[in-house]
Image (cartoon, rainbow, N blue to C red):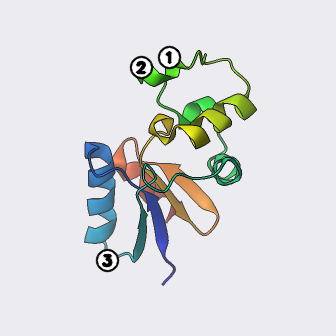
Amino acid sequence: MDVIEIWHNPRCSKSRAALALLEARGHKMRIRRYLEDPPSAEELRQVQGALGLRAIDMMRPGEALFTELGLIRDADDTRLIEAMATHPKLIERPIVLWKGRAAIGRPPERVLDIL
């Protein structure tokens, strides 16, 4: 069985729910606490490609930090990815990766779509 990677924030209810959903199905997982082990800009670009989304769709624009950094929804992907790499709090959660595919667990059941 291949290992699923989850970018997890244990303080987030959606992240905890997605993790519980995967564990209940017996999946082997690598849990990455992305706030403590932030992804690089290159990793974020790879995940963006796997998600098939714009960078803004991987972010939490409602975070006060988004505005404090002067970011806007129409900023180019490069700027937004650099912001996420520098400030991982801006990354939407959870993100689940498996076999080159990715899903954002909002709602948590969405992670099952890539398995």
Which circle's residue, 1 or 3, is located before the other in the chain?
3
Mark 1 residue element: helix
Q: Nearer the viewer, mark 3 or mark 2?
A: 2
Point 26% across, 46% down: residue: 11
* Residue 26: numbered disc: 3
Point 61% across, 16% down: residue: 72
- Above or below, 55 relative to 9: above
Would residue 54 be seen by someone viewing this image from the given angle? no
Mark 2 residue element: helix
Point 50% across, 16% down: residue: 68
Q: CA distance from mark 1 to mark 3?
A: 41 Å
* Residue 64: numbered disc: 2
Q: CA distance from mark 2 to mark 1?
A: 6 Å
Say what amino acid the circle numbered 2 marks.
Ala
Structural crowding at the residue carrying mark 3, measured as other residues with C-alpha within 10 Å and reported as few (<14), some (14–19) or many (≥20): few
Q: Whole-percent x and y of residue 12?
A: 29, 44
Q: Whole-percent x and y of residue 85?
A: 60, 43
Would residue 98 be seen by someone viewing this image from the given angle? yes
Q: CA distance from mark 3 to mark 2?
A: 37 Å
Q: Whole-percent x and y of residue 44?
A: 64, 48
Q: Nearer the viewer, residue 109 or 67?
A: 67
Furthest residue in direction bottom, as rendered: 1
Which circle's residue, 3 or 2, is located before the other in the chain?
3
Say what amino acid the circle numbered 1 marks.
Glu
Query: Pointer 2 and pointer 1: residues touching (CB < 8 Å)?
Result: yes
Residue 101: which quarter of the image? bottom right
Mark 1 — residue? 68
Say what amino acid the circle numbered 3 marks.
Gly
